[in-house]
Image (spheres, rainbow, N blue to C red):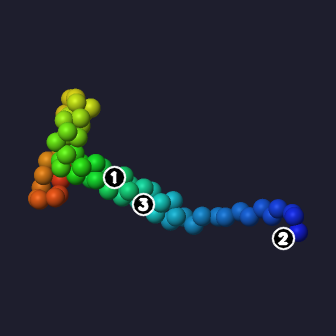
Amino acid sequence: MDGEAELVVLHPRPGDRLRLGRQRAVHLLNYGQEVARWLAQNSFGLCLGVLALGSGALDVHAVAPGIVQLG
């Protein structure tokens, strides 16, 4: 390098934003399922989850052993 900075401009393709949006949605879904799984397996955590949610806006129930579903 000669000590000078060079500006690089990246131009995203039209489908890149949609792909990133889908990746974020999948990440949030996976995170929500992990939280639900932990709450279902941890009775103290489940109590905290019920207290935190209060109104029952989020329903956590087991679908199969080790698998929970957010409702």
Residue hosting label 1: 31
Looking at the image, how many numbered discs can be counted on the residues?
A: 3
Please tell me whether residue 40 is drawn above or below residue 30 in the rendered image.
Answer: above
Query: Dots 1 and 2: beta carbons under 8 Å?
Result: no
User: Could you say which is closer to the camera, residue 36 or residue 14?
Assistant: 36
User: In the drawing, does residue 71 fall left or right of residue 25?
Assistant: left
Amino acid on which the number 1 mark rests in the picture: Tyr
Which mark identifies residue 23? 3
- Secondary element under disc 1, as helix, strand or loop, is helix
Residue hosting label 2: 1
In percent of the image, x 20 and y 39: which residue is there?
Answer: 44
Residue furthest bottom as drawn:
1
- Secondary element under disc 3, as helix, strand or loop, is helix
Please tell me whether residue 29 is drawn above or below residue 8 in the rendered image.
Answer: above
Amino acid on which the number 2 mark rests in the picture: Met
Amino acid on which the number 3 mark rests in the picture: Gln
- Of label 3 and label 2, which has the lower sequence position? 2
Q: Distance between the residues labelled 3 and 2?
A: 36 Å
Q: How crowded is mark 2: few (under 14 residues within 10 Å), some or many (20 or more)?
A: few
User: Could you say which is closer to the camera, residue 5 or residue 8?
Assistant: 5
Q: Quadrant of residue 14?
A: bottom right
Q: Distance between the residues labelled 1 and 3?
A: 12 Å
In percent of the image, x 51 and y 59: which residue is there?
Answer: 17
Q: Residues within 10 Å of mark 1 (few under 14, many from 20)?
A: few
